[in-house]
Amino acid sequence: GINAHPAVKAISPQAPMTDVWMGDDFFHNGAFRQTYGFDYVQEMEAQKTDVRVDSRTDTFAQFLQEGNFANAARDAGMSSLPTARAFLEHPEYSRFWQAMAVERALHRVEVPTLEVGGTWDQEDMWGTQAQYAALHPLDTGHQVFLVLGPWNHGGWSGIGAGATLGPLQFGQATGDAYRRNVEAPFFEWYLKDRPGFDVRGVMSFRTGENRWQQYAAWPPQPRDAATRLYLTASHGVALQAPAGEGAVSYRADPAQPVPYLSRPIYSTYGSGSRWSTWMLEDQRFATSRADVAVFRSEVLDHDVTVTGDVTADLFAATTGSDADWVVKLMDVYPKDAPEPLPDYQLMIAGEIFRGRYVRSFEHPTPLVPGKVTEFRWSLHAVDHTFLKGHRIMVEVQSSWFPLYDRNPQTFVKNIMSAPAKAYRAQTQTIECSAQYPSHLELNVTPASLP
């Protein structure tokens, strides 16, 4: 699709690795995907057989004991291997990573392009939407299309694919429907001039309602039409901005990080791994922790649909000089939901931001202890209906371990080799005030809550 050969008539990037530092395989907004990066090097570069890493060790305990990634790489004998060296030497968004970023090379639409991705893709959800965002403004000939389905990585492929994912049932084989109604007609049209491809621009499977939607573009609504969902000091959510003072605080201790899965957590692709569906795991294992700030709506008395980009706009302070912020948007099921979903806490969107990069991804700087700072980042786009009887919930935490390496919470030049003494417990404060109204920006229909 870049400098395309004349024989190339159409392409379909599916879960494309677009920028492995900004939001795909190896980093997300500066936070290092530790276990995934470790297993990648072990499988792809530490051997010549492509045997998957299959350890029955709880990687939570393993990486906690190692302390930092430099120690883990050294003990595995892989410090000098190419990708491990890149991790160790380029933790910031250096020219090394920038040179590989595909969206930086997308200057025109050279061939018809069908972008495909899953809303629960545990590896490359960012890339699909980033490529579409780069190409769509350049599309003067209606040749760029996007499909987002209720899939994990590659979940749209295979016979009978996409009927279920984790605990969810969609009432149809969504992968089969995509290949039959979109992918095959797309190539039939552009390769053989056969009619039948009638996608307007974007197809998205709306979860909750479990039905396909078509849009002219993605996101469907302009950014300035977004609704603000405010976090309140009483641990609620509201559509009205707070009127006075208020804040929510928690103590984050790197010695006891929040896991991204309930333990034990095995190697990425090993036997017993739950990697493929970790984004759909019931989040109650995290919600009960004292180092997780929880904000809930009342029980919904009508359906609420969120479509398009979800952006976290967090006003926060730390007693340290660095911090990670994780924000998760969740659908809480009612007690009478069918098994296994009673009281289930389903993550609809979630993303991490490493505080040291708030001013620049290329040049990290320490945070000022106690100073309220605005952190703003995308949780990516969703198409989901919170059904009547459910609740909308937002969680904020400061670790997501061991998928992401621990932030020492004191500023060091390179977290990959942070000394043990740098890892210190700190108090994190989420502001919920008129001056500093922490919120999510999202497109809500209808724009009302109980």
Image (cartoon, rainbow, N blue to C red):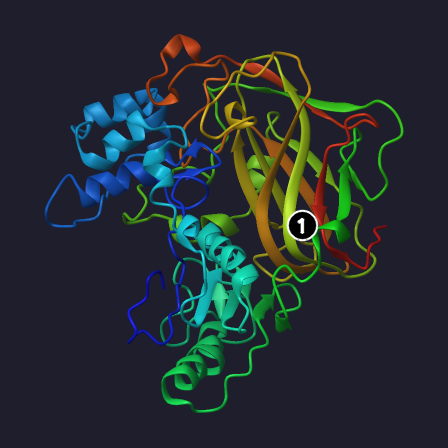
Residue 123, visible in the rendered structure: no
- Residue 44 drawn at (x, y percent): 19, 45
Q: Is residue 86 left or right of residue 276?
A: left
Residue 131 image position (x, y, % from top left): 47, 56
Q: Residue at x 37, y 76 (%)?
A: 159
Quarter of the image where one finds residue 211: bottom right
Q: Can residue 440 be seen from the camera position used here?
A: yes
Q: Amino acid at mark 1?
A: Val
Q: Nearer the viewer, residue 174 or 363?
A: 363
Q: Position of residue 172 (x, y in %)?
A: 53, 76
Q: Which residue is mark 1?
A: 332
Above/below status of 171 relative to 425: below
Q: Badge 1, how many Cα within 10 Å: few under 14, some, many 20+? A: many
What residue is drawn where x is 43% and y is 91%? Answer: 194
412 horizontally vs 81: left or right: right
Given the current orientation, which residue lies at the most extreme top position?
Answer: 421
Q: Residue at x 44, y 58 (%)?
A: 152
The residue sitting at the bottom extreme is 194
Based on the displayed image, in which of its 4 quarters is residue 428 positioned?
top right
* Count of numbered tags: 1
Which residue appears at 62% of the width and 25% of the height?
Answer: 290
Q: Is residue 164 above or below residue 333?
A: below
